Amino acid sequence: MPTARIDLFGIQIDAVSLDETLGVIRDWVQASDTCRYVVTPNLDHVVQLRANQSLQAAYHNASLVLADGWPLVVGSRLFAKPLPERVAGSDLIPAILGSAEEWGGLRVFLLGGMPGVAERATERVHKRYPKVEIVGCHAPPLGFEHVAAENQRIIDLVAESGPDVVVVGLGAPKQELWLAEHHLQLACPVAIAAGATIDFLAGEQIRAPRWMQKCHLEWMFRLLQDPRRLTGRYFRDAVALPGLLWREREATRHCLAKNRQRSVDS
């Protein structure tokens, strides 16, 4: 299913709901012709994108770009090109697993997490989603992306297990850069850059209570859980946000002025 994309903060984001995303991924799984990869940008990714051309290319070449962060959804509405909702990787993966029965079963490969985490996630997934088969999992060593043999090992593991979906939890921007470079070598229909989702599936990390998610406060819950890792990141993103909004405002004004001039000229 073709999707509409909006230009926001220097990237193109698919204007789709979670249900529409599930429909797209189901069609890809059924088509099973080539591997398409999905990225889920949040505000921190947008900040990183400005100084990372390889990451910009990875986002440009992704088959689906889903707004994981509420600042992106709110920003889209401020500039009159609204995204329908936030589609977080940590919501998308459980929704895909929950659709397995309707889809006639689902084969999944888990790539990422610390040693043993994906195995614990496998046990929990089998109990909760009986129509999902975790056909393989792998926690690559630190720095694997720079070692050709390690990259080939992952490609071979995926080929041997034959999954429908590969869930990639290597952290940003590593997971996006790795998928951009290697997705065409993966023998699966869909690969999803899903951040900490494998940790959530394993119970290593806990999602914020539903009321905090609805109030857009999940970031606060995560900060309280892991202040050492996230304080600096959130501070950097908060400092960068006014500049992002200003540049988007100016880009929107420039685009509107060009459209008005075209109308006058025609």
Image (tube, rainbow, N blue to C red):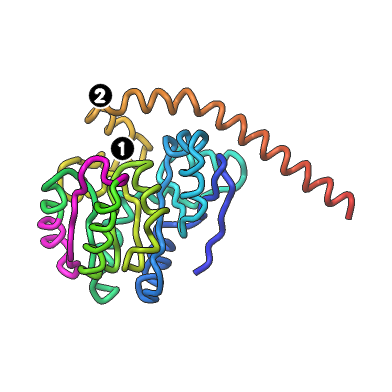
The image shows residue 153, relative to residue 199, as above or below, that is below
Residue 93: x and y in percent read 29, 56
Identify the amino acid type marked 1.
Answer: Met
- The residues bearing labels 2 and 1 have C-alpha atoms spaced at a distance of 21 Å
Quadrant hosting residue 30: bottom left
Query: What percent of the width, then of the height, locates residue 88?
Result: 36, 48
Residue at 31% over, 37% down: 212
Indicate yes or no whether the magenta region holds residue 160: no
Which of the two marks, 2 or 1, is nearer to us in this view?
Answer: 2
Q: Position of residue 59 (x, y in %)?
A: 48, 49
- Residue 228 numbered tag: 2
- Residue 38 pos. (x, y %): 40, 56
111 or 82, nearer to the observer = 111
Query: What residue is rendered at 49% in x and 52% in y?
Result: 84
- Closer to us: 76 or 189: 189
In the image, which residues are magenta?
Answer: 122-146
- The one nearer the camera, 97 or 117, is 117
Q: Indicate whether 208 appears above or below 39.
A: above
Q: Amino acid at mark 2?
A: Arg
Residue 218 position by quadrant? top left
Horizontally, is 35 left or right of 243 in the view? left
Dot 2 or dot 1: first in sequence order is 1
